[in-house]
Image (spheres, rainbow, N blue to C red):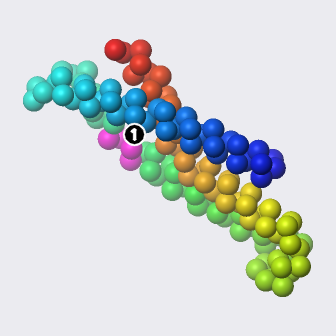
Amino acid sequence: MSARRRAARNTRQAIELALAVPQVVAHRVSRAARAGPFPSPRDRREFQRMGTEKIAAFYESWNALVVEMTRANLRLLCSPLGPLKPWALMAAGSRAASMHVRAALDILHGGTSPYHRRAVANARRLAGLR
């Protein structure tokens, strides 16, 4: 996948995340306000889900970042440019820069995907509960 397509994918993901998060937060805050000090069993399940999802998303994101960083390092190590040879990177010019841009975009995508997946799914699910 080209760097341009990776950037477009990350942009789409960021926009979807920026739209979904406020919807989910607004729904959950209003739900907590309505529940008051005595939440129903359904509200307690939703509040429990909020916490466990955040923890799971954090660990999935951390793992994805490690995996993508490892892949990027292995691609660099196995590339014809060799492992961290600055003179080779400078001589390669745009090819090396493009390789680094693609790696950075993949790392960003891997790290934000768990949050994106959950936020968009929650926005859809909670929109049907109103």
* Helix, strand or loop at mark 1: helix
Name the residue located 13 percent from the left edge and 27 percent from the top edge: 36
Residue 10 seen in this snapshot: yes
Residue 75 seen in this snapshot: no
Question: Is residue 13 toward the left or the right of residue 84 in the image?
Answer: left
Q: Which residues are magenta?
A: 51-55
Which quarter of the picture shows residue 76? bottom right
Name the residue located 60 percent from the left edge and 40 percent from the top edge: 13
5 in magenta: no
Disc 1 residue type? Glu
Question: Is residue 61 toward the left or the right of residue 42 in the image?
Answer: right
Residue 126: horizontal and vertical position, in percent?
Answer: 39, 22
Question: Is residue 9 toward the left or the right of residue 118 in the image?
Answer: right
Vertical comparison of 108 with 9: above or below: below
Residue 28: horizontal and vertical position, in percent?
Answer: 30, 30
Query: On the image, numbered disc 1 is attached to which residue?
Result: 53
Residue 79: horizontal and vertical position, in percent?
Answer: 85, 69
Specify the principal SS of the magenta part.
helix
Name the residue located 40 percent from the left edge and 34 percent from the top edge: 22
Depth order, front residue of 26/83: 26
Name the residue located 10 percent from the left edge and 29 percent from the top edge: 37
Residue 7: horizontal and vertical position, in percent?
Answer: 70, 48
Vertical comparison of 52 with 105: above or below: above
Task: Rate crowding at label 1 as few (under 14), some (14 to 19) or many (20 or more) other CA atoms within 10 Å.
Answer: some
- Screen quadrant of the C terminus: top left
